Amino acid sequence: EDKVVQSPLSLVVHEGDTVTLNCSYEVTNFRSLLWYKQEKKAPTFLFMLTSSGIEKKSGRLSSILDKKELSSILNITATQTGDSAIYLCAVTSLWTDKLIFGTGTRLQVFP
Amino acid sequence: DTAVSQTPKYLVTQMGNDKSIKCEQNLGHDTMYWYKQDSKKFLKIMFSYNNKELIINETVPNRFSPKSPDKAHLNLHINSLELGDSAVYFCASTGGFYGYTFGSGTRLTVV
């Protein structure tokens, strides 16, 4: 069965710290891995990583896909209180558009 | 303009009642979805429709019946509500390969 596992489940840091969130997956015929940020309402899209785009960066956030290890990391440098959220990792396969989510990592950034 | 809109945002109802949640997207996407997020924030797909046709039905009880009158709308009707149906229900749409757009969610509380 397709599966996505995220770690840690929860993380508490101070502003200015750098954090690394992990995502590992098992999926038949992998197509893409996506990262989302969820604050109070809907998940908002951060990155999509595929075989042809294994590294993405946007401001203080960056993500890398390791297809050999079937995993991805999401890095956030110089964290701010506004980064506090649940970060969700999801994968898709070649056969379907559905997103298979992990359980998420709850990040809390304190001043 | 809201890209994916759901109504209502909150729904409190008694066990045994029947209720509906509506979703509309103005992105011109072909595929729409319903996801359920439980109290532990785990997001899981329920249904997907592509251009009004049911594509995915993820072993959801048949008390849940999606309906897609056209490709811009996907409604979810739930019969005989149970306590375990309490969750946040997200509608989403995708136009293809590049990620999803989620609605802001409907928080359903069954009492």
Image: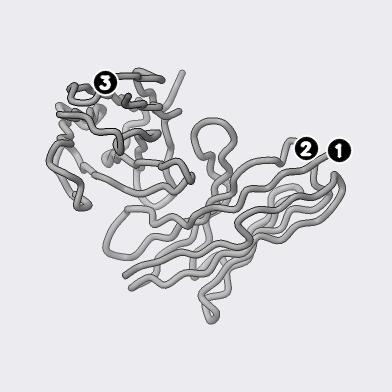
Say which amino acid is labelled 3. Gln
Q: Secondary structure at mark 2?
A: helix
Q: In this orientation, does residue A101 appear?
A: yes
Badges 1 and 2, same chain = yes
Task: Determine crowd level at label 1: few under 14, some 14-19, many 20+ residues with C-alpha closer than 10 A.
Answer: few
Quarter in which the N terminus of chain A is drawn: bottom left
In this rendering, would A45 be left or right of B23? right
How many marks do you count on the picture? 3
Give the labeled residue for mark 3. B14
Image position, residue A38 (x, y; %):
56, 40
Give the labeled residue for mark 1. A111
Chain bearing tag 3 is B
* Alpha carbon distance from label 2 to label 3: 38 Å
* Alpha carbon distance from label 3 to label 1: 42 Å
Tag nearer the camera, 3 or 1: 3
Which of A80/B20 is in front? B20
At x 58% / y 43%, what residue is drawn? A37
Marks 2 & 3, CB-CB < 8 Å contact: no
Q: Specify the quadrant of the image occupied by residue B31.
A: top left
Mark positioned earlier in the residue sequence (1 or 2) = 2
Q: Secondary structure at mark 1?
A: loop
Badges 3 and 1, same chain = no
Image position, residue B33 (x, y; %):
29, 40
Marks 1 & 2, CB-CB < 8 Å contact: yes
At x 19% / y 39%, what residue is drawn? B51
Q: Which mark is residue A81?
A: 2
Kindly give the residue lying farthest to the bottom in the view shown.
A68
Image position, residue B80 (x, y; %):
16, 29
Task: Determine crowd level at label 3: few under 14, some 14-19, many 20+ residues with C-alpha closer than 10 A.
Answer: few
Q: Secondary structure at mark 3?
A: loop
Say which amino acid is labelled 1. Pro
